[in-house]
Amino acid sequence: MKNIMVNRLDRGFYKYQSEFENKALEVLRSGWYILGKEVSAFEAEFADYIGTKYCVGVASGLDALWIAFRILGISKGDEVIVQGNTYIASVMGITINGATPVFVEPDEYFNIDASKIEEKITERTKAILVVHLYGQASNMKPVVDLCKKYNLRLVEDCAQSHGAKFDGQTTGSFGDIGCFSFYPSKNLGAFGDGGAIVTNDEELNNDARVFRNYGSEKRYYNRVVGTNSRLDEMQAGLLRVRLSHMQELEEEKRNISNRYLDELQSSSIILPRIREGATHIWHQFVIRVQRRQQLIDYLLEKGIGTMIHYPIPPHLSEAYRCLHIPKGSLPITESYAESVLSIPLYNGMTAEEQNYVIDVINRWR
């Protein structure tokens, strides 16, 4: 029996093993482990990769989100519009600051349905949070236009979309702030937690740098009550190695995903679609299937792993019971939660493994 996991991180390590190991030793031998030259270099390189003026390394993607809303001054009494089918961390970035999430249904591409945003805007709306889910860039032009029309802040959750583009522009560069995660499973993954804030606004860049380091511009001189959220030197150094290979890594996952799109023929599954003008970096390959548990069990029996991203939408989670949003309020979101399934996709996936996954799924009825 085959044993094909839904994701494998070791293959990505072995692909550039000597580079990772050499960089790790370089950092260890440097004697400088927090906010040193590796972080500064990565921030400059990642900002250039995204196409923004500034990048601020932080400890995680969630930290990037809640710090972003904090430095934008969004707090209790404010509303932030966000799609209903996102990972719960997107919503936590809003509520940690006391603001209220206002959910909008997703479109057929799993991203926010821009045509349904305007009807949700009230006098309390202060921002729109766009989540580029699963690696595909969202439909950004109408969102940008709405933010200009109503003078709203625009924050992008790019935790899954490193390098994805809409109309040739990279995700993270459209709004006031772009928020990234470098969790190990991401296309640009670290070997632990990590995140970043990107922006073209010098004041927001300075505020983020101060806030991530205890609110301090100069050691022991604290301007605001900040937090401790710093991308460390080791992760920054290892991320620099992976960033230098991003084009190759992205192309590899795109080739695997194109095989799935071309060769998966089961009439019982719905394949993902790509919006015109958008690019997809394939953080996940997400199908939809009505008899999901039957397919999961069938694939598991054949030695193929799967994962559900995500089985419980935020508005139905125990954590957000306080929002009093009943089941049935977001039918498209809830339908996706009941039918989405991620199948194996990772750098280093062999042709034999791809063939087996395709063959096994095509034999399922």
Image (cartoon, helix red, strand yellow):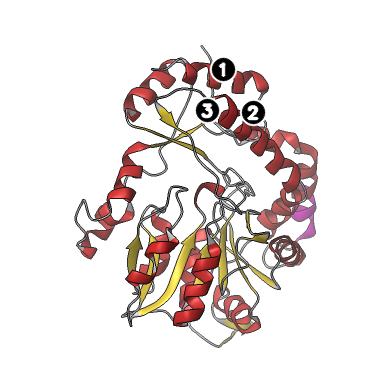
Q: Position of residue 115 (x, y in %)?
A: 41, 63
Residue at numbered disc 3: 5
Residue at numbered disc 1: 356
Q: Nearer the viewer, residue 318 or 133?
A: 133
Disc 1 packing (10 Å; few <14; some 14–19; many ≥20)? some
Q: Give the magenta range.
A: 25-31
Q: Tell me which label, 3 or 1, sits earlier in the chain.
A: 3
Residue at numbered disc 2: 349
How far is mark 3 from mark 1, CA to CA?
A: 12 Å
Q: Position of residue 19 (x, y in %)?
A: 79, 43
Disc tally is 3
Q: Is mark 2 on a helix, strand or loop?
A: loop
Q: Position of residue 73 (x, y in %)?
A: 45, 82
At x 63%, y 80%, the residue is 201
Q: In front of the other: label 3 or label 1?
A: 1
Disc 3 packing (10 Å; few <14; some 14–19; many ≥20)? some
Q: Which amino acid does label 3 sit on?
A: Met
Q: In front of the other: label 2 or label 1?
A: 1
Q: Is the magenta stretch mostly helix, strand or loop?
A: helix
Q: Is residue 106 magenta?
A: no
Q: Which of 314 and 233 is in front in this view?
A: 314
Q: Tell me which label, 2 or 1, sits earlier in the chain.
A: 2
